[in-house]
Amino acid sequence: MKIDVLTLFPAMFAGPLDESIVQRARKNGVLELAVHNLRDYTHDRHKTVDDRPFGGGPGMLLKPEPIFEAVENLGGEKTRVILLSPAGRKFDQAIARELAAQEHLLLICGSYEGFDERIRENLADDELSIGDYVVTNGALPAMVIIDAVTRLLPGVLGDDESSLDESFSRELLEYPHYTRPADFRGMKVPDVLLSGNHAEIAKWRAVQARKRTEERRPDLLK
Ligand code: 4GY
């Protein structure tokens, strides 16, 4: 899969995507990632990417010309062009799976007060939000989406890493996990997990996952 990112803060992407599973996917050629500075698609002396809203009001908007030009340069037939802003549909594991099936994503990070509406209406295929809060710009949201999508690409996760996706595939939270020591400062691991009775252990885990989901995330059961 190819992912292009359009941002005013390309330096923010150094680090998170150079580690761990995403870095491994890049090295293996499963993910081809390129981060582009929106200012490189301007033509004026000041590299202007923003302007004041018609009708007045506070703040600045991302102007259409550099973003249209960038998409025309970077995009093709099979590109899914995605805006990132709090006004988008809420990103979740189902959308991550949907995106992981695409050939080419072009993620456009929001900045300032947001986008000129014509970008939304005439250029974007989709608009996504990572949650109902506002961060300073779309770089962190883009990295969240890239990370969640990359780990779903075929061949990226090894067998023992894959299991974590199951809790959301089953749409339940994970049951409680314990490792050694069996008694840490008097805090004991539940006896059933030390019993060696695998049927009982599976039953206990299913009950715990259900209980935890009911308590913390009843919305997942609806
Ligand atoms: N939440 N999900 C988000 C965000 C920064 C003001 C529009 C989010 O995706 N992006 O908070 N982005 C804002 C800042 C203008 C983008």
Image: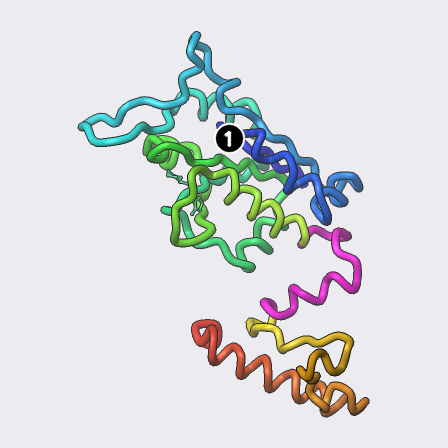
Q: Nearer the viewer, residue 95 or 213?
A: 213
Residue at the (75%, 74%) spot, across then down: 179
Question: 203 above or below 61?
Answer: below
* Residue behind mark 1: 7
Residue 176 location, x and y as percent? 63, 77
Q: Looking at the rendering, which quadrant does residue 205 occupy?
A: bottom right
**Total count of labels:** 1
Secondary element at image label 1: strand
Specify whether 206 is left or right of 50.
right
Q: Looking at the rendering, which quadrant does residue 74 occupy?
A: top right
Specify whether 93 is left or right of 204.
left
Question: 85 above or below 89?
Answer: above
Question: 16 above or below 52?
Answer: below
Specify whether 48 is left or right of 34.
left
Q: Quadrant of ligand 1?
A: top left
Residue at the (51%, 38%) spot, across then down: 139
Q: Nearer the viewer, residue 29 or 130?
A: 130
Specify whether 35 is left or right of 83.
right
Residue 80 location, x and y as percent? 54, 40
Image: magenta residue range? 152-169
Q: Is residue 130 magenta?
A: no
Question: 121 above or below 203?
Answer: above
Q: Nearer the viewer, residue 160 or 88?
A: 160
Q: Amino acid at mark 1?
A: Thr
Mark 1 crowd level (few <14, some 14–19, many ≥20, 10 Å Cα) = many
